[in-house]
Image (spheres, rainbow, N blue to C red):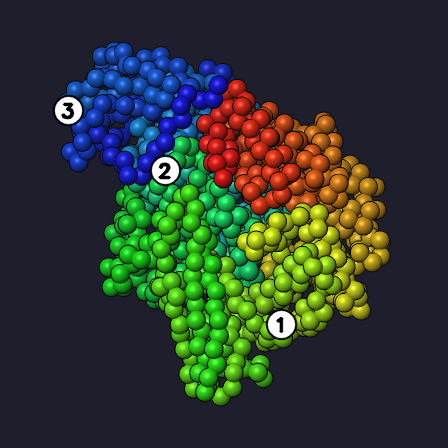
Amino acid sequence: MRDASPQTVYLADYTPFGWKVESVSLAFTLDPHATRVRCRMTLTPNPGAPKQDFFLHGENLQLISAKIDGQLVTPDITADGLRCAVPDRAFLWESEVEIDPANNTALEGLYMSNGMYCTQCEAEGFRKITYYPDRPDVMSVFSVTIDGPHPVLLSNGNPVSTSEGRAEWHDPWPKPAYLFALVAGDLVAHQGSFTTRSGAEVALNLYVRPGDEGKCAFGMEALKASMKWDEEVYGREYDLDLFNIVAVDDFNMGAMENKGLNIFNSSAVLASPETSTDTNFERIEAIIAHEYFHNWTGNRITCRDWFQLCLKEGLTVFRDSQFTADMRSAPVKRISDVIDLRARQFPEDQGPLAHPVRPESFQEVNNFYTATVYEKGAEVIHMLKTLVGDAAYADALDLYFTRHDGDAATIEDWLKVFEDSTGRDLTQFKRWYSQAGTPHLSVTEQWEDGTLTLAFRQETKPSAASPAPAPQVIPIAVGLIARDGSEAAATRVLEMDQAEQSFTFEGLAERPVASILRDFSAPVVLDHPMPDADRAHLVAHDTDPFNRWEAARTLARKSLIAMITEGAAPDAAYLDALAAVVTDKALDPAFRALMLGLPSQTDLAGTLDQAGHTPDPARIYTAAEAMRDAQAQRLADDLAALHSDNQVTAPYRPDAEQSGKRALANAALALISRQDGGARAARQFTDADNMTQQLAALACSLRAGNGQDLLASFETQWKDDRLVMDKWFSLQVIEAAPDEAAATARRLTEHPDFNWKNPNRFRAVFGALAMHHAGFHHASGAGYELLTDWLIRLDPVNPQTTARMCSAFQTWRRYDEDRQSMIRDQVTRLLDTDGLSRDTTEMLSRIAAA
Ligand code: B3K
Ligand code: ZN
C-alpha cells in the first residue's frame, strides 16, 4: 500500500515552534553505509509560541542515543520524528544517529554520487540527517565537524580548521536547516576571487571531479558578474570570506543555494564551447546568478513556512531575469520567458494541478516547486514593479532588506513593505497570490471623433483551487502605432481592477493600431480581435519588441488553428510579414531567430481546448510541419544568405551577440534542411568546432532522414562525456517522427549507458518523450504506457523525480475519449502500485480528480 494516510498541511494551521535553537553543533563521521551524526543544541523556550509537545523531525534515522542535559533519555520514535518530555527551561539536547548515504537513492538528505558525499536539504531533507526542528522559521548558528578520509571536506560558512581527515566549519549567519550542506570527496577546485565594494576579499571555488577542470571558467565568470550585479542593482554585498560551488552528477533539480556552499547539478554549471550549446551557457549563467541572489532573497531573508516559497523563489527568478536582461538582450529575455511561461505555467494553471502562487495546503511540499510558484511568482513581481514604477520598486526593496534581514518572512510582510513605502493599498493585488488560474483578458475597440476607447473584460475560470475567482488588478501596458508606422502614443499603463472596464485615448488625428499588453505586462491570455492587416502592421512597426514578436506569433497561431480546424492553407499575410522582419538586417539576429519560431504543439493544443475544440495531436503535428515547409518556401531565396551571413568567424564566445547569430543561422539551417535533404547540415556537422553548431546540424540531419551516420559518429566522439551523452539520448527522441517516438525511447532504455537512476539521464529520455506532443499522445497509447512502466520502476528509487514527471499527464482532460481512457488506465495502474510514494500519490490523485 501507499504511505500511511498522507497528511495534508494547511497554511491556516501555522504555529511557531515552542523553542529557539540558540546554536547547533553537528559532528559527522563519514562512512558509506554507517555515517554517524552527532547533534548538540541549546534550546530555550520560545515565549511567543503556544504550549506544545517537544517534537523533532526525523526520517530513516537509526537513533543511537539521546540526552537532555547530559542524561540519557528514551524518546518516543515514529516514522516522521520523535517526541520527548523536556524541562520547562533552557536545556542541552544531544543525539547520535546512524544513516546510510550509499543507499539513499532519493537524493534527499545526505547521499552519495560517484563516490562523493553531498546533501540536498530543501525542503525537508535535513530530517534525514538528524533529529531536528526541520522548518524554515527555526534559524540557528551552525558549527560543523566532518571526519572522513577525503581530500575535500566542506560545509557552510567559513573554515575554522582543516587537518588531514578532519575539517571544522562555522557559519556565523543564523539559518534554517534546509540551507545546511556538506560535501566530501576527491574534488579539484577552480579558484577565483572577488573584492566586494566595501573592500572585503572573497575566495571563490568551483569544485568538480578530476577531469572536469576545463569546464569551470565560464561558471566562475558568471559568479563574479552576479556578485557585482547584485551590488550595483540591489545594493547587496556578499557576507562570508568564502563562496563555494560544487558540481554533482546525481541531482534532482538544477542547483541549491545552501549558505556559502551552493550545490549544482553538473549540467547547470559545467560548460565548454565544445560540449555546451549557447542555450546551455545562458542557462548556466542564469542559474549561477539565481543561486547567488538567494543569498539575500532566501537566505538572509527566508520563508516563515513552505507556503511562502514564492517569497524567495518568485523574487529570485525575477532578479535573475533582470540580470540576464542586463547581461544580454532585454527583449530576447522577455520573449523567452513568456515562451517558457506558456509552455510550463499555463498548462499547470489551466489544469488539475492549478494552485495559487501561494498555495494554502499540500501533502508533499516538493510537489510545489512549480512553474506557478517560480515563474508566475516572478510575473507577479514584474506587475508590482510596473504598477509602482522603477524608483518606488527600488525603495521598497531597500525597505524589505532593512526591515526583514534575519527574518523568516511572509507574503504579508512583503506586500506591507510596498504598502508602507508607496502608500498604495495592495489588498486586491494580493489576489495574485491567493487565486489560481490564468485570467482571460478580452478587449474590444471603439473609435469616434479622435477618441479610441478600449473596453476590457477579465474572466478567470473557476477551478478546484479557486472556485469563485474575483477580479484582479491587471496592469495593461498600451501603446498606439499610427498608420505611417510612427508612434501615436507612448506606452501608458492602464490599471484594471474591475471585471469590465474601459479606458480612452483622446485627441488622435487618425485611428491608430493599438499595441496592448506590451512587454507582457500581466500573465494573462489576451484576446484582442483585429484585422490581420493591422496585426501585420504591428509586426512591421511596433516599437515594443515583445509585442512586435507577439503580433507575428498571434498571426502564426491563428493560421495554424485554421489549418488544423478547417484545413486552411498557411496564411500568406503571416508569411510576408515574417519574411520582412527576418530579412531585416537592422534587427538583432537573436530577435529574428525568435520570430521564426512557432507556438509549440502543446501550446496549440491548449489554445484549441480553450476555444472548445478537442485537440488532435496528429493534426496539430501535420499543421506545424506544413507551416514549417511554408516558411521554408516563402524564405527560399533568403535562407542561404541567412545561414552564411550569420556564421561567426571570431573565436567562440557564448555572449548574446555571437549566440544570436548562431541561433539565426541554425534556424535558417533547419528550413534549408527541409529542402536539401540535410546536405548543408551534414557539412556543418563535419565543420563544427562548437556544440551549438554540431548539435543543431545533427538535429537537422535527423529530421531530414540522413542523420544516422552522424548520430553514430557523435556517440563515438562523446561517449565519455555524460553531459553530451544526455543530449545524444534526448535528441533522438525529440527528432523522432510521432510514430517512432515511443519506440525510440524504449530502444534507448536498452542502451548500456541508460543509467536510469541518474535524474539527468532519465529526463533526457523521458522528459523528451513527454515533451514530444504528437509522440507522447500517439493514438496507440504506447507513449503513455512506456512512461508509466518507467515511473513505476523509478518511484521507489527516486520519488521526487517520479512525481515531477507525472505532470506529463496533467493535460489529459483536453483530449478525446480514447486518449482520456488510455491515460486514466495508466494513472490508475500507477496509483495502484504497492508502496507508491507520497510525492507521486499526491500528484496523480490531483491529476485524476480532474
Ligand atoms: N531552492 C532550490 C530548490 C529546491 C527544490 C527542492 N525540491 C533551488 C532554487 O530554486 O534555487
Ligand atoms: Zn530558487
Relative image position of residue 372 (x, y in whole percent)? 45, 47
Q: Give the residue at x 21% y 17%.
A: 85
Q: CA distance from mark 2 to mark 3?
A: 33 Å
Q: Give the residue at x 34% y 33%.
A: 9
Taking depth in this image into account, of 533 and 249 the one nearest to the observer is 533
- Mark 3 crowd level (few <14, some 14–19, many ≥20, 10 Å Cα): few
Residue 357 placement, left or right of 807: left
Q: CA distance from mark 3 to mark 1?
A: 75 Å
Q: Which residue is mark 1?
A: 532
Q: Which residue is mark 2?
A: 361
Q: Compared to 364, does 672 lie above or below?
A: below
Nearest to the eye among marks 2 and 3: give it. Answer: 2
In the rendered structure, find residue 470 and report the number of the disc placed on it.
Answer: none
Relative image position of residue 617 (x, y in whole percent)? 67, 47
Nearest to the eye among marks 3 and 1: give it. Answer: 1
Q: Give the residue at x 33% y 15%.
A: 77
Relative image position of residue 308 (x, y in whole percent)? 35, 43
Q: Give the residue at x 36% y 55%.
A: 470
Tell me which amino acid carries mark 3: Arg
Q: Who comes first in sequence, dot 2 or dot 3?
A: 3
Q: Who comes first in sequence, dot 3 or dot 1?
A: 3
Residue 779 picture quarter: top right
Q: Who comes first in sequence, dot 2 or dot 1?
A: 2
